[in-house]
Amino acid sequence: MFFLSRQTVGRHRSLYAGSFVALAVGVFLLGLAATATAATIAYHGPTSASISVTTLGGDGTAPQNVKVPLSDADVSGLQTVLSLVGTISGFITIFVIASTFAFAVASRRREFGLLRLIGATPRQIRRMVLGEALAVALAASLTGALAAQLATPLLLRRASYTELAPVKLEPASPWVPLAIAVAAGLLVAMLGARSAARRAGRVGAIDALREAALEPPRIGPVRVVFGLLFLAGAIVMLTLIRPSSGEGAVPLAMFTPMVMVIALTLLAPLVVPLVGRLWAVPLVAWTQVSGRLARSNVLAAPRRSASLAAPILAISAIAGSMVLSLSFAADSAAATIRDAVRAPIVVTGAAPVDSAQVKAVDAGLPLRVVRVAADYAELEDAEGIDPAIAAQTRDLTVRSGSLAGLTGNTVAVSKEMAGFESYHVGDEIPVVFPDRTPVKLRVVAIVKDAFGVNPSFLIPLDLARKHAPEAQTERSFVLPADGVAPADLVKQVPGAQLATDWEADQADGVRKGNRLGLVMLLGPAALYSAIAIANTLLMGSLQRRHEFVTSRLLGATPAQLRRMVLWESSLVGTIALSLGTVITVTVGVLIRHAMTSGVADVPMTVPWGILLGIGALCLILAVGSALAPTTYLLRRSQPSAAVD
Amino acid sequence: MTATAPTYPSTAPAGPPALLLDSITKTYRSKAGAVDALRGVTYHFARGSFTAVMGPSGSGKSTLLQCAAGLDHPTTGTVVLNGVTLLGLNEVELTKLRRAEMGFVFQAYNLLPSLTVYDNVALPLRLTGRRPARNDVQRVLEQVGLEGKAKRRPAELSGGQQQRVAIARALITRPSVFFADEPTGALDSGTSRQILGLLREATDRAGQTVVMVTHDPVAAAYAERVLFLSDGLLAGHLDRATPAQIAAAMSDLEG
């Protein structure tokens, strides 16, 4: 059947143009993420910056030698973002491909019927559609991969020396990452085309003789079951967004909307008319015939409406939840930093101790140690502190044990880390210091979490000095002497800031980092969704020539038809956006609750501008890409065309 | 309208029926209620016969054709094609039977616009997994008078030429039964005559059976027998009738 696929793709170029563009962009993003990831993997940092350690073994795992690079965390931020970009691109690609192929199949019922009539088996039809998908996917994937290869140096130049990757990144060998991207593109296209192919196979020979391409009115039980399963999964994930999830709450808040979107898309033929009925009430009340027509068009073809709503729902829910979650996370980080700093002054770098105006300086030494566990070894942030001073300058509330014993080979562990690894006071944690000395650290205390101020591991200052001789103080917390106003002292000490200013800077830094991540994550996803939205609506409208001509014959003016399409696309857009809003608000409320428990007076920053911008953009795209082809069609279809 | 009746072979070919309809009923159910399109039709189509089915619109003639060709399932009754009962066949078996034994010609020419004339005609062979022999395709193209047009695409042909491509496509598998639904509905009378002549030739030369639904008495006059259908029941027949006789019978039915 492949010879047929090849020829039919050529014939239906306009039908497949959307799939081609969508997939090419998808593979481009995947490829870019893959080549950039390869570049981060190829990046080895300063030479000799890795430590060989032997894991502990036990619990059925043998001890093994692992190499822990000392600088990998430098690019791990970028790697995380890139893997998210890849995931989101892949997710939306499946989505768009499935809907464009479903559209292509639905509008070719007669052709498939004809092939069945002259002797094609359902299997042959399925293979033909899959063959078409393969032909399109192959061309699109190669185009996307080529574009990704060309754009990689550009991306790496932009990503180098940023918060996510404060190093210089060079392109690595592109073959493996691009092969992965192309393979992923083909896989995604085949997955997306599968259900469309199956539907094409179900077209009967008799469909060749039927004029109207009416869609089957009911949705299949399998689809409903899967929809409900995904919905249940999403609800379970939602219940996990709670205070006890700690840092895991943010990724959950990012991925739950995707599961929710899948669930709602599967159930869309049921949900969309329901929500549509609601929104149609004011529409019908305000407009005359055009609103009424739009309402019946949206409600009478729930499947079509659902596939038009799907990309809008997907991007609004995912982008909305992500923007809101990250903003709330930044709020919570700001509050945590604020609560954790007790000293009134913070000095960047080391502070002079000998001044009479200074009572105490908490100049912690940041260092990284390799923590050795049963079957892995991991680089951890640690800080060498003088517990007597640090307990005054920052929040080191002890949950159990005592900081008084923080001398010699000992460690104080943050509550969250202790919870993850189930450390208790008296346990011994084997670590390897930057000077390659293995030491067993005895846990003397579990202290309150203070993200952004205290790392998870606090060790005695002397121990840090001994094993990390190159460590430099990055910031010091300063207590002024009695009677000295902090505001005065700040002016005299170079690099000094009032703690409140420093806290604000830190919070700003978090938001700035988030913004970069958001742009990298949502920029491509938004571009992609825009293509998808325009694509489905364009194809949907172009299929309606006959309907428009008939309506014109019945006496509808072009203006009436344009209004009808305007209301229709607004209605679909509003339905999708309201579902997206429900998801965003739900996730927002839960993440806010999870992030603020145990912290008082957390500021709340809702990025209204961005959120409303996303909504407005979706609506403008939806209405614009429905109206443009309608205007085009109306200009070319006089009522007399109905007679042809 | 031409008044000259075509000539027929003096004797109808004998043998077991090519197509047998036994008490076919077809009921369409919808929200508005049930509609009986066929209410018990029994008929034997003899091998090598050319039969026209006529009737007012809504009389069930298209439904009859679709049930006979296995495109639609009758509500009750059986269809036997060359000794094979269609009722027990699944979709794939039905498809294989269709491509081996049946040819279709419809009012809409139903050609694939993306394929050349040659590829359209060869398509049924390719669907069976055979490599079409160039000679076979050329032969049927000559048979329908389209030699030299093999490389054209359907959009470059006239309506009559497209219909001839459709007939060539039906001929290529040498089916035993042709189903034609208003094959001349969209053609002028001269072109219609050529098309009907081709169907006539299929029965006369190759012993193929033709079942043709039409509302045009001139087209029906090419058949040896005209069956009249009314309200889902057979209402009579005419053998070797002239267009005038057929038209009179039709107006009786409609009146």
Image (cartoon, coloured by chain):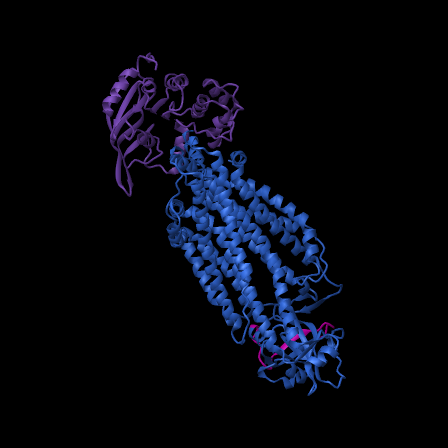
The verdict on residue A433 being magenta is yes
The x and y percentages for residue A436 are 73, 72
Q: Residue at x 54, y 49 (%)?
A: A530
Q: Is residue A456 left or right of residue B60?
A: right
Above or below: residue B53 compared with residue A171? above
Above or below: residue A378 compared with residue B113? below
Nearest the viewer among A61 and A504 is: A504
Q: Is residue B192 left or right of residue A377?
A: left
Image quadrant containing the C terminus of chain B = top left
- Extreme residue toward the bottom, this view: A482
Chief SS of the magenta region: loop
The x and y percentages for residue A504 are 63, 71
| Residue B26 seen in render | yes
Nearest the viewer among A125 and A560 is: A560
Range covered by the magenta-colored residues: A420-437
Above or below: residue A42 compared with residue A57? above
* Chain A drawn colour: blue
| Residue A190 seen in render | no
The x and y percentages for residue A601 are 54, 75
- Name which quarter of the figure residue B73 lies in: top left
Q: Is residue B32 left or right of residue A365?
A: left
- Name which quarter of the figure residue A138 lies in: top right
Above or below: residue B79 compared with residue A145? above
Image quadrant containing the N terminus of chain B = top left
Q: Is residue B87 left or right of residue A449?
A: left
Nearest the viewer among A422 and A66 is: A422
Q: Residue at x 48, y 67 (%)?
A: A590
- Name which quarter of the figure residue A482 lies in: bottom right
Among the chains, which one is purple?
B
Q: Residue at x 33, y 34 (%)?
A: B86
Nearest the viewer among A374 and A531 is: A531
